């Protein structure tokens, strides 16, 4: 039980790493793949989606950095860990889903790393305590304030 906050923080690290990798492989893909005589990267929708993904990755990184600082200072509590766990993994699933969409049909084949990132992302919302339970823990701490 004493290790749960640490475990949930580690799940946040994993989410951040997966999101960074998803952005990296998707950028590589959309710059190489062409449709309608253009690179996928040249379509406005692709540019906007990737701008959103890159911003979410930055926000997640700031959240993780702050959590590490709090953990090292000994001020990281269970409620903060629950926030990290649910939000980081929810964001991971959203980001990986958007990145897979930009791969089109190839994104659904295991030859492309985004498919593996997609498969791996889903369980993050379950283990370490489900995201529903994380929200319950946060609500309990809000209720007791
Ligand atoms: C790949 C993997 C690795 C795992 N590794 C470990 C490990 O190393 N150590 C370990 O101890 N466990 C491990 N687990 C177990 C994991 O922590 C549990 O699966 C998880 O906590 C959910 O419990 P459950 O499967 O019993 O689902 P349930 O508790 O049956 O939940 C089913 C659904 O009901 C919802 N639910 C349940 N209770 C409530 C509630 N009070 N309010 C609202 N919704 C609720 C859940 O959110 C979920 O959506 C692992 C699981 C997986 C899939």
Image (cartoon, rainbow, N blue to C red):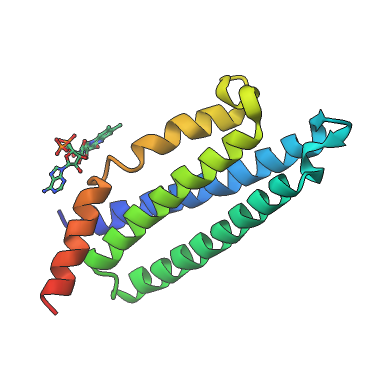
Left/right placement of residue 73 relative to residue 40 reads: left
Q: How many marks?
A: 0
Q: Say above or below: 17 vs 111.
A: below
Query: Residue placed farthest to the right in the image?
Result: 37
- Residue 49, how many percent across, how many down? 64, 49
Left/right placement of residue 16 relative to residue 55 reads: left
- Residue 91, how many percent across, how many down? 45, 51
Quarter of the displayed picture in which ligand 1 can be seen: top left
Residue at 81% across / 30% down in the picture?
35
Q: In which quarter of the image is the C terminus?
A: bottom left
Residue at 59% across / 53% down in the picture?
53
Q: Say above or below: 67 vs 127.
A: below
Left/right placement of residue 17 relative to residue 137 reads: right
Residue at 52% across / 28% down in the picture?
116
Query: Residue placed farthest to the left in the image?
Result: 144
Q: In which quarter of the view is residue 106 placed?
A: top right
Closer-to-camera residue (133/9): 133
Q: In which quarter of the view is residue 142 placed?
A: bottom left
Q: Say above or below: 60 vs 43.
A: below
- Residue 88, how many percent across, how many down? 41, 54
Residue at 53% across / 41% down in the picture?
96
Closer-to-camera residue (51/111): 51
- Residue 122, how many percent across, how many down? 39, 36
């Amino acid at each position: 039980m004493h290790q749960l906050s640490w475990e949930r923080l580690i799940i946040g690290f994993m989410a951040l790493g997966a999101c960074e990798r998803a952005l990296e492989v998707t950028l590589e893909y959309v710059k190489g793949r062409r449709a309608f005589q253009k690179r996928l990267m040249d379509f406005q929708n692709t540019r906007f989606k990737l701008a959103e993904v890159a911003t979410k990755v930055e926000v997640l990184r700031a959240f993780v950095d702050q959590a590490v600082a709090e953990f090292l200072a000994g001020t990281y509590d269970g409620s903060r860990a629950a926030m990290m766990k649910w939000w980081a993994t929810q964001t991971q699933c959203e980001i990986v889903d958007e990145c897979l969409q930009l791969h089109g049909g190839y994104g659904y084949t295991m030859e492309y790393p985004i498919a593996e990132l997609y498969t791996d992302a889903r369980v993050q919302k379950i283990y370490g305590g489900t995201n529903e339970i994380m929200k319950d823990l946060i609500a309990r701490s809000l209720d007791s304030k």
